[in-house]
Amino acid sequence: MQLNKVLQVLLVGASVLVFAGCSSTSDEASESSETTERSQTGASEESAGSGVQTGAADRILTPEEEQIRQREERQQRYADLRRDHVLYFDFDNAAIRDEFAELLAAHADYLMRNPAVTVVIEGHTDERGTPEYNIALGERRAKSVVEYMESLGVSRQQMTMVSYGEEKPVVRQSNERAWSQNRRAVLVY
Amino acid sequence: MKRFGVFLVVLTFLLASKASFATLEIVITEGTDSARPIAVVPFKWQGQGEAPYNFTEVIGSDLIRSGQFSPVSIDELPSLPSNDREIENYSTWARLGVEGVLVGSVAEFAPGRYEVTYQLIDPLRGQITGGMSEYFDEEGIAVEQDHILEARTSVVLDTQFRQYAHRISDVVYEALTGERGAFLTRIAYVRVNPDENLPYQLMVSDYDGENERPLLRSPQPLMSPSWSPDGSRLAYVSFENGRSEIFVQNIYTTERELLTSFPGINSSPAWSPDGTKLAMVLSKDGAPDIYVMDIESREVRKITDHWRIDTEPSWTPDGNSLLFTSERGGLPQIYRIDLDNGRVRRVSFNGESNLGGVVTPDGEGVVMVNRDGGVYHIARQDYPTGNFQQLTQTTLDESPSVAPNGSMIIYSTTYQNRQVLALVSMDGRFQARLPAERGSIKAPAWSPFL
């Protein structure tokens, strides 16, 4: 959780910079992106043109405006994240990896703002181990997602679980790569 | 709650369908040299034209597949007798090293009905007595034919040739090993053809893969078929309603019934030896635990109660206890629980973990999936604890199911990125793969004696 917040702050900060840069030069989008690129890569000015570089200052916002902007930012980012419905797990493990914290936060946010929406959380495993054991392991993964979402504030009533165990692999092959893609939970709206 | 499986596209098929596909073909991979030689002489057709059926081909294949016998090639046989009187010199047969000589004949009895006569002869005994029953007659001694181990005549419908051939195999096997043959049995399994619109199929076939019939085709996964002790019904798990549920289906009438649909997991059904109860795994109270349902009253009794995974119940032959897989000690291991007093004992100790334990029909062994060094193999251990032997060398082995005579284990393995079925004898000496023409094949369940 702590890590998650830090990550959020960092990401928001980063997007503020991008936002500021874009808004000031939106009338000359192509040129500004070219220059931004150049300045980012630290290219020298001896290349074509007059060699000028444009810069921009941050717009001054009231605290209220700043909050609204940040909220819009986050909504947009969450909407993007929500296009992803899958998170992956380690072998014989149901712990949520840190890299999927934002993804689940995005889905949790959406579910909390839309209490009428329900989601089915599917738990899947790779083919190793027996099918009957894997059904149980798949349920543990689904449950782990449900509990995580609950801790973010989502109502238990909005979530149902189903474990498919090893019965519905994405990649029907027997190697590490396939297995790592098959060990997953999927959020199905 | 949003339901996806509201419309069921599940079809059951009549067993009466005429089509028959030999989609499983047996490739023996190991261990025929330990088998005992036997002579299977082609049965003599006593009618016009071609023989209506090649009984001895089926019998020969059965005997090979038992892992116990190795039929001698027809070219090596001294002659092609059809009964003991046609055997002139027993010494030549004895020299072949065969334990038995199967001879027989087929004659038309009525249209569509045939009289099949066969004898199983012991060539060593024949060598001693000369097989000369007349000789003993002249001496005034009672007719002595102890070189004939079995002799039978039956009238068989032409639609039942294959079945009758398996019956002869059973007779031969029992006469020579003292154990009941399991050639007249079936296997149930799940086939997955991802390209088809109903990819999950519950199939049943003869033990050798012949007479394959679909019992159910579904858009959603099917799992864990388990035979009723009389071989007429299968319990299995179906996801047709968007979640796991246990169904019971009569394999002859297609009649099927939803047995459990509790919240959470409904899995791993296992019929009790007396047929009145079904052990299963439910997670309705949180963690997956073992339950036993009385089929008549539908009442479920909780057998295990542990916060970690308990699964894969399997009855001991006396019906008094269950083996199950549990994570209570960390990694999955096999435990036994006594049903009357609830006492739990750990059964498996070898390797990293053990799953899917089943007690052999004689109650003397337990077959399991052993994980050691990250690889999964089928293993056998004296029951409850004792000698441990790894039986297979194939990849990702799972779902072992034991033949009702305890001679052979059928299991699921991975070969060339596909799940296929494989056989291994109880001593590990005989190993065979049953490649499928299409799809993946998994979850085999060997029927009881039929």
Image (tube, helix red, strand yellow):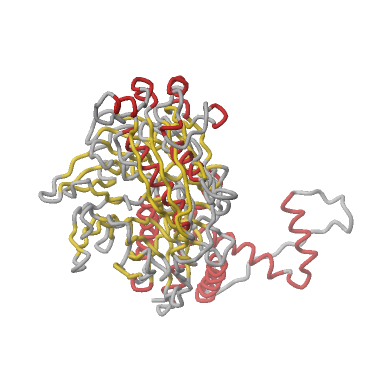
Identify the image quadrant of residue B439. bottom right
Left-right relation of B227 to B51: left
Name of the residue lying farthest toward the left: B341
Quarter of the picture holding the N terminus of chain A: bottom left
Viewer-side residue, B164 vs B242: B164
Left-right relation of B231 to A65: left
Viewer-side residue, A107 vs B219: B219
Residue B16 x, y percent position in the rendering: 46, 66
| Above or below, B265 relative to B26 | below
Question: How many numbered discs?
Answer: 0
| Above or below, B336 relative to A56 | above
Viewer-side residue, B231 vs B166: B166
Residue B320 x, y percent position in the rendering: 16, 48
Residue A39 x, y percent position in the rendering: 74, 53
Left-right relation of B46 to B230: right
Residue A135 x, y percent position in the rendering: 38, 55
Q: What's the residue at 15%, 47% (across, down)?
A: B338
Q: What's the residue at 33%, 55% (across, down)?
A: B226
Viewer-side residue, A1 vs B26: B26
Q: What's the residue at 21%, 44% (across, down)?
A: B336
Q: Tell me, yes or no, if residue A152 can be seen here.
A: no
Q: Tell me, yes or no, if residue B311 can be seen here.
A: yes
Left-right relation of A30 to B51: right
